[in-house]
Amino acid sequence: MKPAKTKFSDAPDGSIHQYDQILKYFNDRQADQTKPRGNRITFVTTGIIGYDGGQTTMLHLGTLLANAGYDVYYLSYVPQSQDEMIQNAEFNYPGYKGTCLPMGELESHQSDIWIATLWESVYVIKNKPGYKMYFVQDYEPYFYPYGDRYQMARRTYSLGLHMVSLGPWCAHMITTHCQVNSPIDVINFPVDVARYPFKERDTKPYASKKEIKLAVYTKWSSPRRAPVTIQIVLENCRRLLRAKGIDLKINYFGTGRSKRFINGENLGKLTPPELNQRYHEADFGIAPSMTNFSLVPYEMMSAGLPLVDFKEGTGSYFLKDDTYFSCHLDERDLAKTLQAACANPDTITQHIEKAQAYLKTISWERTEKDMLAIIANLYADVDVIKS
C-alpha cells in the first residue's frame, strides 16, 4: 500500500549545501583578536540586496566611517557581481562611500578591522588576521525554528568578537540568553529625518472620520514583521469598526506585489519618495517589530504620521511614552485604540509634536559619535597614523 498524495509537506529544514562555499569556516574556535594598526575596515555581508533596511544601515554607517578617514569595504561572502553590489548599494543609500568587493576577494582581501553583519559572517571572519567586530542588528537565533541553525546563530555571540548592538534590545537579549566572552557596546538606533521630511497635519477631521486609512509595513519573508498575524488582526478589526460605521482602508507595503493579502491593497516595495506620499496620505501607520526595531516606524513618525505600535513587540525599547499609540496585537484593543485616538484629535497632535522632539535626539550624528568613539578606543594603545 502506498500513501495518498497530499498537498501538504514537512516544515522546511534547509540543506547544508547552501553553505558549500563557506563550510570550511564553520568551527567552534574563539576569534583570534589583534589590535588594528591601519585604517582598513571591512563589512562582510550577504551581497547587497535592494530594499534591505539592515544593509542600508550598514552602508550609512560605512559612509560615516569613510567620511572620518577610514578605508571602508563591503565584501560579499555569497556569489554576486561587483556591478550588482554597486547598483544595489547606490539604490539603498545614494551617495554611499566605500568599495564593494565580490566573493572572489574573500581569501585575498586584508583588513585591519572586520565587521560581521549576519551570524554566518561571524564564522567567515572570526579567524582572519585583524580585529573582529560584530554589528548586531537583531537577535538572529529568532530568525529560525528552535533547532540547529538557531543554536549556530546563538553561538556566534560567544565566539569572542567585539559586538556592537544597534539599540539596547539586542544587547539585552545577548547578555540574558548567551555566555558573553567579549565586549558588547550599544550604539544609538538612528533615524534619517532628511529622507522623510515632516509635513504638518490637520488633526481636527479625525473626530468625524468614517474611513480610517492605514499604512501598514510587513514582509512575508520576515516573520519578525508579523505578516500573518497583522492580516488576521486587521481583518477582525475591520469587522469591529464596520459595526460602528467606520471603514478601515488598509494599504500594505514592504512585500512584493505578487503576494495576495486577505484584505486591503498590496502596494509592493516603495521608494522613499513613494513612502513619503503614503505617509502623508494615511491616517495612522503600523509597522510590527517582534524582534529588534525596524527603521520604518521612525520614518513614519519623521513624516508626521501617527504611529500605532504593539506591546508584544520591542517598541518600548525604542520609543518614548506619548510619542505613539500603544496597544496589544489583537483586534479589540486595536479597534479601541483607533477609535479613542480619533475621538481626541488633540492627543494625536500632541503625540506628533512629542515624536518630532524625540526624533531630534536620535539622529545619525549621535550614532556616528557612538561608533567613532568605539573604533577610536581600539587604537588607543596602538601607535597608528591613519592616511
Image: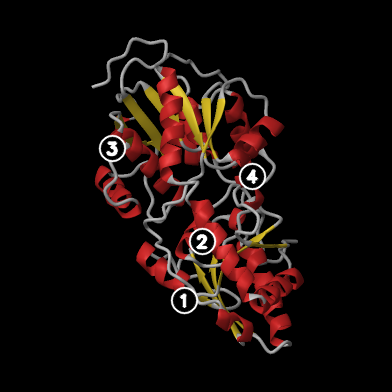
Q: Residue furthest bottom?
A: 245
The spot of residue 320 in percent (x, y) is 62, 52
Q: How far is the residue under mark 2 from the one under mark 4?
A: 27 Å
Are circles 4 and 1 on residues that touch, CB within 8 Å? Answer: no
Residue with the mark numbered 1: 281
Residue with the mark numbered 4: 142
Q: Which of marks 2 and 4 is nearer the N terminus?
A: 4
Under tag 1, what secondary structure?
helix
Q: Earlier in the sequence, mark 2 or mark 1?
A: 1
Give the number of the mark in front: 3 or 4.
3
Under tag 2, what secondary structure?
helix
Q: How far is the residue under mark 1 from the one under mark 3?
A: 36 Å
Q: Residue at x 56, y 55 (%)?
A: 222
Assign the C terminus to one quadrant of the image. Answer: top left
Residue with the mark numbered 3: 98
Q: How far is the residue under mark 4 from the one under mark 1?
A: 34 Å
Residue with the mark numbered 2: 301
Q: Which amino acid does label 2 sit on?
A: Met
The answer to which of 30 and 273 lies nearer the viewer is 273
Q: Residues within 10 Å of mark 1 (few under 14, many from 20)?
A: some
Q: What residue type is labelled 4?
A: Tyr
Are circles 3 and 4 on residues that touch, CB within 8 Å? Answer: no
Are circles 2 and 3 on residues that touch, CB within 8 Å? Answer: no
The answer to which of 245 and 99 lies nearer the viewer is 245
212 to 143, vertically: above or below: below
Q: Earlier in the sequence, mark 3 or mark 4?
A: 3
Q: How is the image coloured?
A: secondary structure
Total numbered circles: 4
The spot of residue 172 in percent (x, y) is 66, 36
* In the displayed structure image, the side of residue 14 where residue 303 appears, left or right: left
22 to 348, vertically: above or below: above
